[in-house]
Structure formats: structure tokens, C-alpha cells
Amino acid sequence: MVLFMKYFGTSGIRGIANNDQFPDFYLHIALTVGTILKSKDVALASDGRITMPILKGAVVSGLAATGHNVIDLGTLPVSGLQYYCKVHKIPGLMVTASHNPSEYNGIKFFMENGMDFNLEMQEKVEQIYDSSKYMEKKGEGNAAESGINYVDWKSVGSWTHDDTAKELYIKGVLSHVDVEAIRAAKLTVLCDCTNGATSETTPMLLKELGITATVINGTLDGMFPGHQPEPIEENIGSTIELTKRSKIDFAIVHDSDGDRAIYITPDGRYLDGNYALSLIGLGKIKKGDKVVVPVNTSDIFLDTLQRLGGVADITKIGAPLVARRMVEIGSTFGGEENGGVIFGAHQFCRDGAMSVALMAEVVAKNNLGHLLASLPGFYYRRDKVYTPVPFDRIKARVMEQEHVSQDETDGIKIYFSERKWVLVRPSGTEPAVRVYAQGANKQEVDDLLTFYKKLALQE
């Protein structure tokens, strides 16, 4: 097992299309993946990024050339693809760069159970890719010796379409919530689809739940004209302002491929994933339950979990890592502060639609304001900085700062007191360093973020 991947990041492979990753790269990756997959059928979906045709064409060609039948599901949230894989017991690929800016694109890879490729599969893809690429550059060998399983021309795979995936996905989500209670509450929401893959599915879900929805940024557009595709507070100011002017029960904001959902209160309060985990967890976590969350999780949720009698299992950051750990220890609830709720009764992955349905159930049965008032009063925020400075140098500087304890689970997390901390780590999805901070109030956290972002830029 490798500890560092050359091409794979936290979730799949991604980069700037036609800049640092070109069509031949994705074709070769697809040929490599097609070589290791045993299933004849492979599902394929995408969000609406401008460069989608480049990657999608390369993926179809590579899989078909290695004998696989590609079942094209069209535009679909990544969690919808994962559910399709789970139900039909076939692997899948998603053309997306998730929350990254519009110039990025990439591929996510899923096994027959809908979960991300495990580390062994990622390592095998990288090994075959590198060895076959080397042979091509040297002009050595033939197709049979390249390591790629090219099939005879009469045996190439097909390319078909299946338009049932959206309905299948929504039906699966509905099976896990009290639909009648939600319908009876006659909720009203604002839904921001971020011009991404949820533009059809989340409105479909809300309609089935009897929720009156005003949908914004609901047309597929790979330039993301509404706002940047990562649903962090600084990106969605216009949605927050619209929420304040609307008479609604809450607002929903997705990322571009739909595995995340964050929420906004009627008065415009931004609720990151720590709040979603806490609010949903109030009705789902029982005494003794093991709950898996990464090291950047706030005490907003960890204190709530302790109050409920649950036990936290802390991992490195990354939804695939959290999901794998959940399966390992038999946990059915987990997630991340970025808006990714993992509800194991449905599937072991972040799922934006499942999160929306669970949150609707919470609000339908409770007073949202009262629930929020019962949660711990910490302030939490994250940011990032693009820096050329090697991370080991940044880490050393962080550790030089006065602190009372430290945690090296992922990057470096230092505690200034039990409730005041900062975490600095290299991003697994783009060339940036991410900084997370928790404190008593906004000013304290903003000061921490400002200081450690500047520290990450020092040569």
C-alpha cells in the first residue's frame, strides 16, 4: 500500500483540463482502469463542466477498447451514480472536478458497492499507467506487452444510455425518511443548485416531499455564473442575502457534483457541515453509536455527539477515508464539515440529496431555532491559500508557534487551549494549503486564519 499517490488526490483525479491534463492522459487512465475492472458493464455520469466532452469521450473510448459496455447515465449527482452502482452491482466513473473552479475537471472512480476505489485499486491504476506510458515513450513492445488489456476489434464494448438513474436515486433517498411528516409540515425552501448536477434531482426530491421550492442557479452551466461551485460562506453571499428577503424555512446550497449540501437559516445564518451533522444527528445518533468524522471537525458537532452518548472515531480528511472507516468499524453515521453527510443506511458516501431529505425531516418535526440554540456556541471557519512553499516547511513554522498540544493525524493541528485550535494541511484536490480554525468568536477565528495563511506564504 502506498502512502502518497502520484495522480489520485483525496477523491479521484483532477486538474486543469487542456492545461496540465490533456485528453491523452484521460484516455490512458481509462484504458488502465478498463484493464483492472472485471465487470463487463461500467456506469458513467457527469456534471456540466465545459470540458466534459473531452473527458467523457476519452473515458468511453478507453473503456470500450478494453471490452467494457459503458452505460451513460447523463448528468447526475455523483451520489446518484454511486447509488446506481450499488443497486446494479457494477463499477462507475464520474466526470467531475467536484467543488473546484470551472477550469478544473477530473474523474472519480467507484467500485461495485458504490464506494470509491480503495487504495489498492488506486495503486494498481497508477502502476499500470506508468509502466504502459513508459513503454509507449520508448517505442518498445506491442499492445499485448503494454500492460493494457486491449480486446479484439470484434469484442470492443458498447455505449448505451439509461435515463432511469435519477428516479432510482430519488426513490432510494425517500425510503429513509418520514415522507408523510415532511409533507404535512408544508415546508418552503430556497434551493441553490449551483448550476450543477443537482439541477434536476433536488427539485424532483423536494416536489416528492411536498416542499414548496424556489430554485436558483438551476440550469446546467459549466461556467457557474451564479457563484463559485464550492458552497463556502464567502462564495454564496448573494444566496444568503436572497434568503434573508425570502419567507422560507431554510435554504439549501449544493456543490457542483451534488454530494454536499450546506444550509442557511431564514435570517441568513450560514450553517456548515458541523451544524448539519449535529442537527441530523440529534434524531439519528443513539447512546454508544460510533460516528466517524475527520480531524477538522468542530466541537460544535463533537460536543453534541458526546451529549448524545455517541463515540467519535477520528480520521484523516476525505470522504472516501471516512466512508471506509465507517464500514471497518460498523458505523452508520458520519461525515465532514464541508457539507458531506454520510448516512450508512442509504449508502456509504457523501450524499447531498440524502442530507436534504434528512434535514427536511428535522425541520418538519422540530423548531429549527430552538435546535440551533441548544448546540455549542463555538465559531468555526476554513480558508485556503495558494502557495509555492513546500508543506514540510510550513508545518515546521506552525509547530514553532506557541501551543499547548498538537495532532498530526492530517497535516498539523495545534491547540492553544482546549477549545481554540488551528489545523493546516495540504489540499488533496488542488495546489493549495487549507487552514481551519475554531475559537470563541468570529474575530478570534478570522485572526487565526489571517496569521496562518500569511505564514504559509513565507518563503
Image: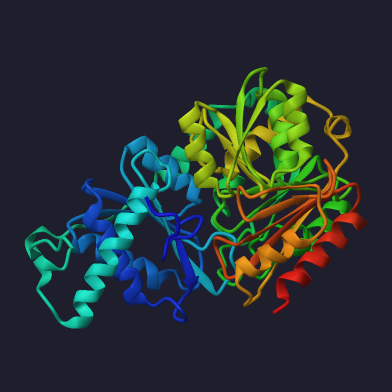
Q: From the viewer's perspective, is 205 left or right of 380?
A: left
Counting from the top left corner in percent of width and height, residue 191 is at: 70, 50
Counting from the top left corner in percent of width and height, residue 287 is at: 67, 17
Which one is in front, 270 or 142?
142
What is the quadrant of residue 129 in the picture? Answer: bottom left
Camera sees residue 207 = no
Instruction: Report the number of numbered marks.
Output: 0
Counting from the top left corner in percent of width and height, residue 280 is at: 69, 31
Which one is in front, 251 or 135?
135
Q: Residue shown at 55%/28% (left/top)?
A: 332
Rendered view: 96 above or below 385: above
Q: From the viewer's perspective, is 155 left or right of 170?
A: left
User: If the image is split into quadrants, where does the C terminus sit?
Assistant: bottom right
Residue lying farthest top?
A: 287
Camera sees residue 5 = yes
Q: Residue shown at 35%/69% (left/top)?
A: 26
What is the quadrant of residue 238 in the picture? Answer: bottom right
Rendered view: 43 above or below 370: below
Q: Residue shown at 65%/33% (left/top)?
A: 358
